[in-house]
Amino acid sequence: MGRSYEPVNPPIPIQVMPTISGKPAILVETRNGSTNSIPVKKVLDLWDLDDEWWRIVPIHRRYFKLLIDTGRVMTIFKDQSSGEWFRQEY
């Protein structure tokens, strides 16, 4: 049997307050009309994704796997072309 792949949900925009070096320090989420500031405890991993270079707008992302203040692990990325941040849920 071949490899099993799981679909990835569409990314969700999120506000990020980064450190001077560009790593996420505080995440700002708005859900059901309320806004929460969530401190990042630790960056567990980071990696770059450069893909679809042949398209008019190629993909240039920097991903961060984070341990946040609630003890939850979250993956977010910064679109290096637009500067926008997104939360990626699996």
Image (cartoon, grey):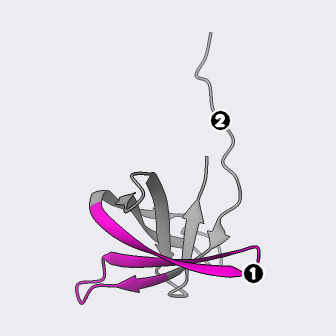
Residue 33 in the magenta stretch? The answer is yes
Q: Which residues are magenta?
A: 16-42
Q: CA distance from mark 2 to mark 1?
A: 31 Å
- Who is closer to the viewer here, 24 or 68? 68
Q: Residues within 10 Å of mark 1 (few under 14, many from 20)?
A: few
Q: Which residue is mark 2?
A: 6
Q: Is residue 71 left or right of residue 3?
A: left
- Compared with 1, 22 (above or below) is below
Query: Residue 65, how many percent across, how many down?
Result: 38, 56
Q: Which residue is mark 1?
A: 33
Residue at the image position 59 percent from the left and 69 percent from the top: 54
Query: Residue 50, how many percent across, how many down?
Result: 45, 65
Q: SS of the residue at dot 1?
A: loop
Q: Is residue 13 left or right of residue 32?
A: left
On the question of residue 52 being in view, the answer is no
> What amino acid type is highlighted by mark number 2?
Glu
Q: SS of the residue at dot 2?
A: loop
Location of residue 32 (image quadrant)? bottom right
